[in-house]
Image (cartoon, rainbow, N blue to C red):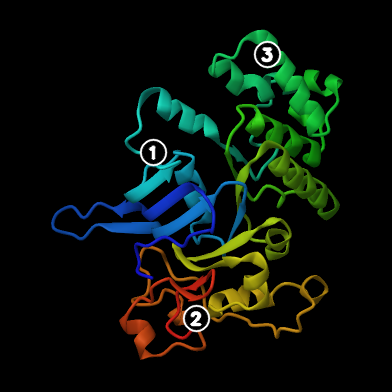
């Protein structure tokens, strides 16, 4: 497989990313200097199929959240394409563009910070419906039905966000995300701020809603145990690049990329029961302003050779439905 061919999920793709880039200019390069960029997303080709949960993992700063914001059109890509149901999101205009925006919604990491403290829950959940021009009677019915479905009572609709627990606030956020009946939900670390006991409740709710509403999820997280629990497939990112992609069971059982192997070895034995030895990575994550030549992971990889410095390995299908960007996979 070459750099620009997409790893197919085995079903009808809802979102298709083609050599997607998101670079931030951090130095102008004026007066003859060379401009510098932070390569938050650096040439990712990836599909998300209908009805699947695609988990995205990696260290902080690897570009996971930047990729999610790009799909939400909160960031304009520097290069490449994002296709939604086959249509290029950058060139879609008018009513079709509005429909695309409504079809992709987000659940945020901070359930309190993402809710307007001046609004009551009824208004928070229904705000998107007001903007979309949904008639009042239908709006009221939909808000009340969603609140009940995520485990809130009708009297909760007349309260403010600070009156709820973290888990309840995230349920409000989930209801808000579903109000416009999206097809894709970008969940950016949606349970990382919650207690462990509440995490499982929210994850179970998200799984139920996926089946009930026919949703697809992009589930961004750093907790690999959580990602394994909810994901159908898992992608591993490093320095803005996708370095491994596989069905969740296959990736957790047999990681092909050394970086993935190191991440998975950090999961406590009580969670993984694999007997895999702990791998402690040496050195810090390189700067995305000046990534290493060749393989981005080579400066921390115990298997690196001269070939790893000389050329960047392509993401290739090493075995059926399992892709890895490593010369020695």
Q: Which mark is residue 249?
A: none
Tell me which numbered mark, 2 or 3, is placed earlier along the sequence.
3
Dot 3 lies on which element? helix
In the drawing, does residue 231 fall left or right of residue 26? right
Q: CA distance from mark 1 to mark 2?
A: 37 Å
> Is residue 24 toward the left or the right of residue 101 in the image?
left
Nearer to us of marks 2 and 3 is 3
Identify whether 314 is placed above or below 47.
Answer: below
Q: Which callout, 1 or 2, points to the residue nearer the camera?
A: 1
In the rendered view, tell whether residue 275 sits above or below residue 30.
Answer: below
* Callout 3 crowding tier (Cα within 10 Å): few <14, some 14–19, many ≥20: few
The reply to whether the C-beta atoms of the residues labelled 2 and 3 are less than 8 Å apart is: no
**Which mark is first along the chain, 2 or 1?**
1
Residue wearing tag 2: 300
Mark closest to the chain's N terminus, 3 or 1:
1
The residue to which callout 3 is attached is: 138
Q: Residue at x 38, y 39 (%)?
A: 87
Quarter in which the N terminus is drawn: bottom left
Residue 115 seen from this side: no
User: Would residue 205 be found to the left or right of residue 259 on screen?
Assistant: right
Percent position of residue 208, x then y? 76, 43
Residue ID for mark 1: 89
């Amino acid at each position: 497989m070459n750099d620009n061919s997409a790893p197919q999920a085995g079903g009808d793709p809802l979102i298709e990313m083609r050599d997607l880039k998101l670079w931030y200019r951090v130095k102008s390069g004026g007066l003859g200097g060379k401009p510098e960029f932070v390569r938050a997303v650096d040439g990712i080709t990836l599909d998300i199929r209908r009805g699947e949960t695609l988990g995205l993992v990696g260290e902080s700063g690897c570009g996971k959240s930047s990729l999610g914001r790009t799909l939400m059109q909160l960031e304009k890509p520097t290069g490449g394409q994002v296709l939604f149901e086959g249509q290029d999101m950058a060139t879609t205009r008018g009513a079709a563009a509005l429909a695309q925006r409504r079809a992709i919604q987000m659940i945020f990491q901070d359930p309190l910070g993402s809710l307007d403290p001046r609004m009551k829950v009824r208004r928070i959940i229904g705000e998107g419906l007001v903007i979309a021009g949904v008639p009042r009677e239908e709006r009221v019915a939909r808000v009340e039905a969603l609140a009940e479905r995520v485990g809130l009572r009708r009297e909760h609709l007349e309260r403010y966000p600070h009156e709820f627990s973290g888990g309840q606030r995230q349920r409000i956020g989930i209801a808000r995300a579903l109000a416009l009946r999206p097809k894709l939900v970008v969940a950016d670390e949606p349970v990382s701020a919650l207690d462990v006991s509440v995490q499982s409740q929210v994850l179970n709710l998200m799984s139920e809603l996926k089946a009930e509403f026919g949703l697809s999820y992009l589930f961004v997280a750093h907790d690999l145990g959580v990602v394994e629990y909810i994901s159908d497939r898992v992608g591993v990112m490093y320095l803005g690049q996708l370095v491994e992609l596989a069905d969740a069971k296959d990736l957790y059982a047999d990681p092909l990329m050394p970086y993935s192997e190191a991440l998975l070895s950090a999961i406590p034995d009580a969670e993984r029961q694999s007997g895999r030895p702990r791998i402690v990575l040496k050195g810090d994550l390189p700067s995305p302003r000046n990534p290493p030549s060749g393989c981005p992971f080579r400066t921390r990889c115990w298997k690196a050779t001269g070939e790893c410095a000389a050329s960047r390995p392509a993401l290739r299908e090493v075995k059926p439905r399992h892709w890895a960007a490593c010369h020695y996979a």
